[in-house]
Image (cartoon, helix red, strand yellow):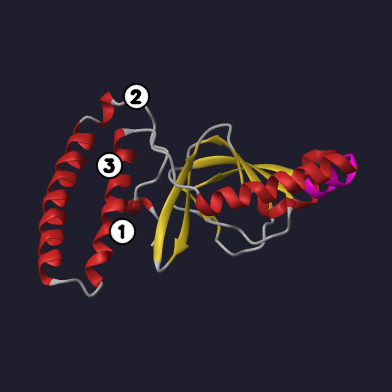
Amino acid sequence: MATGDDQHIQNVTYPKGKVLFKQGEKGAAAFIVNSGAVGVYREANGRKIPLATIRKGELFGEMAMVDNSPRMATAFTLEESTLMVISVDMMMDKMKKADGFIRALIGMLMNNLRHVHDSHTPKSRSLVDAVNTLHRQCEIVTRFLQADLPPKFRADLEAQLKQLDGVLKDLRRLAMAHRDDDRREDAIPAEADLPH
C-alpha cells in the first residue's frame, strides 16, 4: 500500500491518441512525461491550434490545479507515453504547507504565465515547425479575401497567395524529405496529429 506522497503519484502508460484533459475542464492532475510525447492544442474560432509538444522530463497541466481555473488547452498523447500523474490533493497539500510569501509568489507567477499563454505564438524548433507556422500565417492572410475588396486588390492578393501556396508545398516536401537530417525535434504537433 502506498504511503505519504506515493499515494498521490502514479506512473500510468497511455496509448497514442489518448486525450488526457480538455480545454475548459477543471484540473484534477498535473503530469510529468517519463517517456513518449504529449501534444497540446487550443480551440479558438472553430479551429484547433497546435501549441506545443511536451517531452521527457517536462511538466504540464499544473496551472489549472494551482489556481483552480479551467484548463487552457487540450492535451493528448502523440505516441504511447508513460506519465507521472500528480493528484490535485498532493499539489494542494504542498501549497498549504508552503510559506505564505511563496504561495502568493506562485499565484502571481501563474497569473502572469496565463497571460503569456493567451498571446503566445509557438516558437519553431524544427524546419517542419517553421513551415507549419508559415502555413498558419498564410491562412490568416487568406481570410482577407473574405472582406469586400476592390477587384484589382482581390486579384493581386489571390495571385500572390496562389504562388505562396506553391512555395509552402515545396517547402513542406523538402522538410519532410530531409526530416532525418534535422536533429531538432518538432515543438509543435502537426495539425494532422490532433484528435478529431
- Alpha carbon of mark 3 to alpha carbon of mark 1: how far? 15 Å
**31 left or right of 124?**
right
Quadrant location of the C terminus in the rendered image: bottom left
Q: Amino acid at mark 3?
A: Val
**36 left or right of 113?**
left
Q: In the rendering, at what x and y percent does residue 154 appear?
A: 15, 66
Confirm whether residue 195 shows in the render: no
Give the magenta part as a residue range: 91-99
> Label 2, on which residue?
183
SS state under label 3: helix
Of the two numbered discs 2 and 1 in the rendering, the one whose residue sits closer to the viewer: 1
Q: Amino acid at mark 2?
A: Arg
Check contact, mark 3 vs mark 1: CB within 8 A: no
Q: Which mark is residue 131?
A: 3
Check contact, mark 3 vs mark 2: CB within 8 A: no
SS state under label 1: helix
Q: In the rendering, at what x and y percent does residue 92 appear?
A: 81, 49
Q: In the rendering, at what x and y percent does residue 40 appear?
A: 49, 50
Residue at coordinates 14% horizontally, 44% vertically from top-left? 167
Question: Is 170 situated above or below 21?
Answer: above
